[in-house]
Image (tube, rainbow, N blue to C red):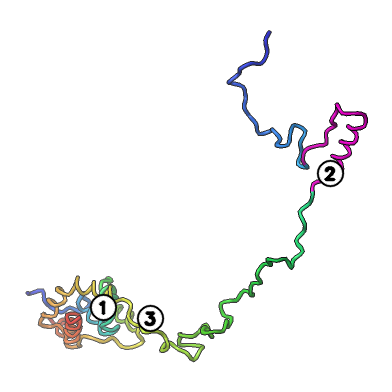
Protein backbone atom coordinates (compact mmCIF):
# COMPACT_ATOMS: atom_id res chain seq x y z
CA UNK A 1 0.00 0.00 0.00
CA UNK A 2 2.61 2.45 -1.10
CA UNK A 3 0.02 5.01 -2.26
CA UNK A 4 -1.49 5.21 1.18
CA UNK A 5 0.01 8.57 1.99
CA UNK A 6 -2.38 11.09 3.44
CA UNK A 7 -1.98 13.97 1.04
CA UNK A 8 -3.48 17.40 1.66
CA UNK A 9 -6.12 18.19 -0.90
CA UNK A 10 -6.86 14.54 -1.61
CA UNK A 11 -10.40 13.24 -1.56
CA UNK A 12 -10.00 11.71 1.87
CA UNK A 13 -8.40 14.85 3.21
CA UNK A 14 -11.36 16.83 1.86
CA UNK A 15 -13.75 14.41 3.54
CA UNK A 16 -11.90 14.78 6.81
CA UNK A 17 -12.02 18.57 6.72
CA UNK A 18 -15.62 18.90 5.58
CA UNK A 19 -16.91 16.22 7.95
CA UNK A 20 -15.28 17.75 10.98
CA UNK A 21 -16.15 21.31 9.99
CA UNK A 22 -19.76 20.79 8.89
CA UNK A 23 -20.69 17.98 11.23
CA UNK A 24 -20.90 14.23 10.89
CA UNK A 25 -24.67 14.38 10.47
CA UNK A 26 -24.15 16.06 7.10
CA UNK A 27 -22.35 13.09 5.60
CA UNK A 28 -24.07 13.37 2.25
CA UNK A 29 -23.13 16.97 1.63
CA UNK A 30 -19.69 16.28 3.02
CA UNK A 31 -19.16 13.73 0.27
CA UNK A 32 -20.53 16.03 -2.39
CA UNK A 33 -18.33 18.93 -1.37
CA UNK A 34 -15.31 16.69 -1.04
CA UNK A 35 -15.62 15.60 -4.64
CA UNK A 36 -15.34 19.15 -5.93
CA UNK A 37 -11.98 19.59 -7.67
CA UNK A 38 -10.70 22.33 -5.40
CA UNK A 39 -7.77 24.19 -6.85
CA UNK A 40 -5.87 23.92 -3.61
CA UNK A 41 -6.40 23.01 0.05
CA UNK A 42 -6.28 26.72 0.80
CA UNK A 43 -9.20 27.41 -1.53
CA UNK A 44 -11.15 24.60 0.08
CA UNK A 45 -10.35 25.87 3.57
CA UNK A 46 -11.39 29.38 2.58
CA UNK A 47 -14.72 28.00 1.43
CA UNK A 48 -15.23 26.11 4.67
CA UNK A 49 -14.38 29.18 6.69
CA UNK A 50 -16.78 31.30 4.68
CA UNK A 51 -19.75 29.02 5.27
CA UNK A 52 -19.04 28.07 8.85
CA UNK A 53 -17.59 31.30 10.12
CA UNK A 54 -15.06 29.25 12.02
CA UNK A 55 -11.67 27.71 11.54
CA UNK A 56 -11.33 24.51 9.57
CA UNK A 57 -11.50 21.46 11.78
CA UNK A 58 -10.07 18.02 11.26
CA UNK A 59 -6.70 16.64 10.41
CA UNK A 60 -3.52 17.63 12.10
CA UNK A 61 -0.75 19.90 11.15
CA UNK A 62 1.52 16.95 11.69
CA UNK A 63 0.00 15.20 8.70
CA UNK A 64 0.63 18.13 6.43
CA UNK A 65 4.23 18.56 7.51
CA UNK A 66 4.94 14.90 7.27
CA UNK A 67 3.49 14.58 3.78
CA UNK A 68 5.08 17.74 2.52
CA UNK A 69 8.46 16.45 3.59
CA UNK A 70 7.80 13.03 2.20
CA UNK B 1 -81.74 22.84 -71.15
CA UNK B 2 -82.43 21.38 -67.77
CA UNK B 3 -81.10 23.28 -64.78
CA UNK B 4 -80.33 22.18 -61.23
CA UNK B 5 -80.54 18.58 -60.22
CA UNK B 6 -78.07 16.48 -58.37
CA UNK B 7 -74.80 18.33 -58.15
CA UNK B 8 -72.49 16.67 -55.63
CA UNK B 9 -69.66 19.05 -56.49
CA UNK B 10 -71.71 22.14 -55.74
CA UNK B 11 -70.43 24.30 -52.86
CA UNK B 12 -71.88 23.24 -49.54
CA UNK B 13 -71.06 26.28 -47.53
CA UNK B 14 -73.83 26.87 -45.00
CA UNK B 15 -72.13 29.42 -42.86
CA UNK B 16 -74.26 32.24 -44.23
CA UNK B 17 -77.55 30.65 -43.25
CA UNK B 18 -79.44 32.55 -40.58
CA UNK B 19 -80.86 30.60 -37.67
CA UNK B 20 -84.03 32.67 -37.73
CA UNK B 21 -84.76 32.57 -41.40
CA UNK B 22 -83.60 34.27 -44.52
CA UNK B 23 -84.66 37.69 -43.38
CA UNK B 24 -83.44 37.17 -39.83
CA UNK B 25 -81.14 39.44 -37.96
CA UNK B 26 -79.56 39.68 -34.57
CA UNK B 27 -82.79 41.18 -33.30
CA UNK B 28 -84.76 38.06 -34.04
CA UNK B 29 -87.27 37.02 -36.64
CA UNK B 30 -88.80 39.97 -38.53
CA UNK B 31 -92.46 40.74 -38.55
CA UNK B 32 -94.25 39.19 -41.49
CA UNK B 33 -97.55 40.07 -43.02
CA UNK B 34 -99.81 37.06 -42.96
CA UNK B 35 -102.28 37.13 -45.80
CA UNK B 36 -105.30 35.02 -46.50
CA UNK B 37 -107.36 36.07 -43.52
CA UNK B 38 -110.51 38.03 -43.35
CA UNK B 39 -110.55 41.74 -43.93
CA UNK B 40 -108.42 43.52 -41.38
CA UNK B 41 -107.01 40.33 -39.92
CA UNK B 42 -103.66 40.75 -41.67
CA UNK B 43 -103.24 44.24 -40.25
CA UNK B 44 -104.22 43.06 -36.81
CA UNK B 45 -101.70 40.24 -36.91
CA UNK B 46 -99.01 42.64 -38.09
CA UNK B 47 -99.72 45.01 -35.20
CA UNK B 48 -99.71 42.10 -32.81
CA UNK B 49 -96.26 41.06 -33.97
CA UNK B 50 -94.98 44.61 -33.66
CA UNK B 51 -96.27 44.94 -30.17
CA UNK B 52 -95.17 41.57 -28.93
CA UNK B 53 -91.67 42.36 -27.84
CA UNK B 54 -89.77 39.65 -26.11
CA UNK B 55 -89.68 39.96 -22.40
CA UNK B 56 -86.36 41.15 -21.05
CA UNK B 57 -84.60 39.33 -18.30
CA UNK B 58 -85.09 41.16 -15.03
CA UNK B 59 -82.10 43.11 -13.89
CA UNK B 60 -80.51 41.76 -10.72
CA UNK B 61 -81.65 43.82 -7.82
CA UNK B 62 -79.86 42.04 -5.00
CA UNK B 63 -81.39 40.82 -1.80
CA UNK B 64 -82.71 37.68 -3.40
CA UNK B 65 -83.22 34.36 -1.76
CA UNK B 66 -79.70 33.19 -2.60
CA UNK B 67 -77.33 36.12 -2.30
CA UNK B 68 -73.68 35.75 -3.18
CA UNK B 69 -71.51 35.14 -0.11
CA UNK B 70 -69.59 38.10 1.14
CA UNK B 71 -65.90 37.25 0.81
CA UNK B 72 -63.41 38.68 3.28
CA UNK B 73 -60.86 41.12 2.09
CA UNK B 74 -57.77 39.65 0.55
CA UNK B 75 -54.80 39.48 2.88
CA UNK B 76 -51.22 40.19 2.09
CA UNK B 77 -48.40 37.90 3.11
CA UNK B 78 -47.53 40.01 6.09
CA UNK B 79 -51.03 40.61 7.44
CA UNK B 80 -51.89 39.26 10.83
CA UNK B 81 -54.70 36.81 10.17
CA UNK B 82 -55.20 35.84 13.79
CA UNK B 83 -55.90 32.43 15.17
CA UNK B 84 -53.06 30.03 15.65
CA UNK B 85 -51.21 31.76 12.85
CA UNK B 86 -50.80 34.86 14.91
CA UNK B 87 -47.60 36.01 13.30
CA UNK B 88 -46.05 35.10 9.99
CA UNK B 89 -42.62 35.03 11.58
CA UNK B 90 -43.63 32.33 14.05
CA UNK B 91 -41.14 29.49 13.84
CA UNK B 92 -38.37 31.66 12.49
CA UNK B 93 -35.51 32.95 14.53
CA UNK B 94 -36.45 36.55 13.91
CA UNK B 95 -39.46 38.76 14.48
CA UNK B 96 -41.92 36.77 16.54
CA UNK B 97 -40.78 35.59 19.98
CA UNK B 98 -41.98 32.11 18.95
CA UNK B 99 -38.80 30.85 17.32
CA UNK B 100 -37.60 27.67 15.73
CA UNK B 101 -37.60 25.94 19.09
CA UNK B 102 -41.39 25.82 18.85
CA UNK B 103 -41.32 23.97 15.55
CA UNK B 104 -42.07 20.24 15.44
CA UNK B 105 -38.97 18.12 15.70
CA UNK B 106 -39.49 16.44 12.36
CA UNK B 107 -39.15 19.84 10.71
CA UNK B 108 -36.03 21.02 12.47
CA UNK B 109 -34.31 17.63 12.44
CA UNK B 110 -31.89 16.51 9.76
CA UNK B 111 -33.94 15.72 6.69
CA UNK B 112 -31.09 14.26 4.71
CA UNK B 113 -31.05 10.95 6.49
CA UNK B 114 -31.83 9.04 3.30
CA UNK B 115 -29.01 10.74 1.42
CA UNK B 116 -26.66 10.14 4.31
CA UNK B 117 -27.54 6.46 4.40
CA UNK B 118 -27.04 6.13 0.68
CA UNK B 119 -23.66 7.84 0.84
CA UNK B 120 -22.62 5.71 3.76
CA UNK B 121 -23.49 2.46 2.03
CA UNK B 122 -21.76 3.55 -1.14
CA UNK B 123 -18.51 4.93 0.20
CA UNK B 124 -18.01 3.35 3.59
CA UNK B 125 -15.77 0.51 2.35
CA UNK B 126 -13.40 3.00 0.73
CA UNK B 127 -13.49 5.25 3.77
CA UNK B 128 -12.66 2.36 6.06
CA UNK B 129 -9.76 1.50 3.81
CA UNK B 130 -8.54 5.09 3.90
CA UNK B 131 -8.83 5.16 7.67
CA UNK B 132 -6.26 2.40 7.77
CA UNK B 133 -3.63 4.62 6.14
CA UNK B 134 -0.71 5.14 8.50
CA UNK B 135 -1.05 8.90 8.31
CA UNK B 136 -4.82 9.05 8.53
CA UNK B 137 -5.71 11.64 11.16
CA UNK B 138 -7.75 10.66 14.15
CA UNK B 139 -10.49 13.08 13.14
CA UNK B 140 -11.00 11.13 9.92
CA UNK B 141 -11.06 7.84 11.80
CA UNK B 142 -13.67 9.21 14.17
CA UNK B 143 -15.84 10.21 11.22
CA UNK B 144 -15.52 6.76 9.66
CA UNK B 145 -16.36 5.15 12.99
CA UNK B 146 -19.42 7.37 13.20
CA UNK B 147 -20.57 6.26 9.74
CA UNK B 148 -19.88 2.62 10.50
CA UNK B 149 -21.94 2.82 13.65
CA UNK B 150 -24.98 4.22 11.84
Quadrant of res B142: bottom left
> How many other residues sit within 10 Å of disc 3, few (<14), some (14-19) or many (≥20)?
few
| Foreground of the two, B9 or B148 | B9
Q: Residue furthest right?
A: B40
Residue B52: image tag: 2
* Residue A11: mark in rendering: none
Q: Which mark is residue A27?
A: 1
Q: Residue furthest bottom?
A: B97
Q: Residue at x 65, y 31 (%)?
A: B14
Q: CA distance from mark 2 to mark 1?
A: 85 Å
Q: Are marks 1 and 3 in contact (CB under 8 Å)?
A: no
Residue where numbered disc 3 is placed: B107
Instruction: Please tell me whether residue B43 belongs to the stretch shown in magenta.
Output: yes
Circle 1 or circle 3, nearest the eye:
3
Find residue A27 and report its horizontal and vertical position in percent.
26, 78
Q: Which residues are magenta?
A: B28-54
- Element type where label 1 sits in the image: helix
Q: How far from the left and from the top, in percent, is residue B9?
A: 58, 21
Q: Is residue B9 left or right of B60 when viewed as pictured? A: left
Mark 2 residue crowding within 10 angstroms, few (<14) / some (14–19) / many (20+): few
Q: Nearer the viewer, residue B37 or B128?
A: B37
Amino acid sequence: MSSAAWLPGSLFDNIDKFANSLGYQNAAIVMELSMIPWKSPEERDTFITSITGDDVKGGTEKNYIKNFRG
Amino acid sequence: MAQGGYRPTAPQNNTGVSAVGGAGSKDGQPNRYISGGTYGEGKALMQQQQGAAMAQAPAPTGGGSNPAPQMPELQTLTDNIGGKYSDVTDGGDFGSPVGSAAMPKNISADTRAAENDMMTRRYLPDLVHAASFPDAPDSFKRFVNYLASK
